[in-house]
Amino acid sequence: MNTMETMKNTNEQTKSLEDIFEAKIARDEKIEPKDWMPEKYRKTHIRQISQHAHSEIVGMLPEGNWITRAPSLRRKVALLAKVQDEAGHGLYLYSACETLGVSREELYEQLHSGKAKYSSIFNYPTLTWADIGAIGWLVDGAAIINQVPLCSTSFGPYARAMVRVCKEESFHQRQGYEIMMTLCNGTQEQKDMAQDALNRWWWPALMMLGPTDDASTHTEQSMKWKLKRKTNDELRQQFIDQTVPQADILGLKVPDEDLKYNNETGHYDFGEIDWEEFWQVVKGHGMCNKERISARKNAWDNGEWVRDAAVAYAEKQADKEVKEAV
Amino acid sequence: MTNENLIEYIYGIADNSLILGQRISELCGHGPTLETDIAMTNIALDLLGQTRSYYQYVAELSKSDITEDDVAFLRTEREYKNVLLVEQPNTDFAYVITRQYFFDVFHFMLLKELENSKNVNFQAIAKKSLKEVSYHKRFSGDWLKRLGDGTEESKNKAQKAVNDLWVYTNELFQMTSNDKIIAEAGYGVNTEDLKAEYYNAIKALLKEATLDIPEVEYFQKGGKDGIHTEHMGYILSDMQYMQRTYPDMKW
């Protein structure tokens, strides 16, 4: 067989593997790590799952900022548990990503070097206790809207991780809303604190649903692989429609002069999002981008001797066992 | 024995859990691996959970209408009765683990005795906490062995932490006059009886961890009388910030 024929055969094999793969996805069957998959599928999944994992662990930082200052023991314990859940989500997601043939160390390296992205919302500072409520309510709320469809995504390990993540996120969202409710039922100072937090977090939360459809580069392919079921704009509308009545119950005003219920469409119309701000933060120039990455990098670098010690100790123990067996 | 005696005794136990829980909380999100981060946060959660049970009991015993949060957040520095060991800073992972291990071994022994207290509240809290603390002790002990018998760097760091924190161990067994009243009533523990067993256990583990046992002439004390190291004021200003800035509000 000459080279041309070999290439032709390989191409045909790949084509038939790809057909099997596409048919599986069309039947809503899961793709598992050992199944054949196109290289682009593998790469896209590593990118998205790791970005998601990074968002979980970077997301621990702005909320972690209030653990030592939480206003009551009950709130302190709940916040610690929430931030711990995020570490747990990071752990499942990194593990899901590792099944695609990439190590956790490589993924961290990508985060620390700025090559990998994470959710931009975590580059905003948490200034008051009300921010902890607003993050739970709005940020976890937007995250759930993004993530629920992923429970039925095509890649098995990701879909299974997301089932667990979503259960915990919806608990966090209720917890955040409850913090806001307590503030809104409190003194004027507490209400003002809640309103100020909503003012600062509302627009970044809308941006979390991603660029508008015409500016989004990955939507079409992601829809095909069930990494996405709705477009960014549809998800954003869903978030707004769901959240505005919740703000009304709290007695808070959503900081958008153009926000108005549209009887014809059955949805809220809303004002222009400041995309320049969005791209500024995505590109690394938000208030806390540098701080967040350096906190992650410090934790990793300062932990190196600890990880080395664990490896050295395990090796010594294994040697001892061998010697004892001999 | 009055309720005031009992409250004072509870501070001596529960403030350790509060301040250590607060200290460990500072580390959440900054651990050397995700797994240790999650495990240390678990320990903080357990300690803060135990603190709440004790302070709720204080609120019950108190003559005035107070809550667990008043007890946790509204005392002044001299009114906290935790030992000096637990307020020591998170200098590095070796300090964090050594501080934890030195405390956990004591904590476990104390709770074992408290489980037999004549006071049913103490019995119940001790029983629940023992399960948690036996895990803490295993976690910190295993890590101290890894650090001691790991690399040269980890051994040096662990040895330094052991040397620096050793001076705070003796205070764990100090009996205040109030402790004696509660112990004599069969409610509290005579911690002096635990000392020999404690040092035997610690020394055995340090030996296994290939670490040297420090020899010191003098130990530090003061926390049980409310005389703290300079770290304490900063821990409190952080912890009490909301309650002090916005008094009498519900959160």
Image (cartoon, helix red, strand yellow):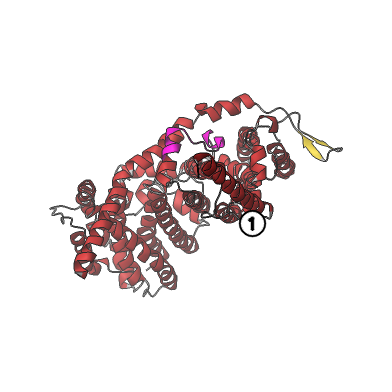
The part of the chain drawn in magenta is A109-127
Image position of A233 (left or right of A80): right
Image coordinates for residue B108, horizontal then vertical, percent: 33, 66
- Residue at 38 percent of width and 47 percent of height: B31
Chain for numbered disc 1: A
Magenta-drawn stretch contains A125: yes
Amino acid under disc 1: Glu
Can you identify the residue that label 1 sits on? A29
Mark 1 neighbour density, 10 Å: few (under 14) some (14–19) many (20 or more): some
Which of B112 and A55 lies nearest the eye of the viewer?
A55
Please name whichever residue, B104 or A271, is drawn nearer the observer in this view of the structure: A271
Q: Position of residue A149 (x, y in %)?
A: 66, 49
Q: For the view shown, which residue lies furthest in the top direction?
A: A276
User: What x and y, as percent, mark residue B230?
Assistant: 30, 42
Q: Where residue A28 appears, x then y in whole percent?
A: 67, 55
- Does the magenta portion include A87? no
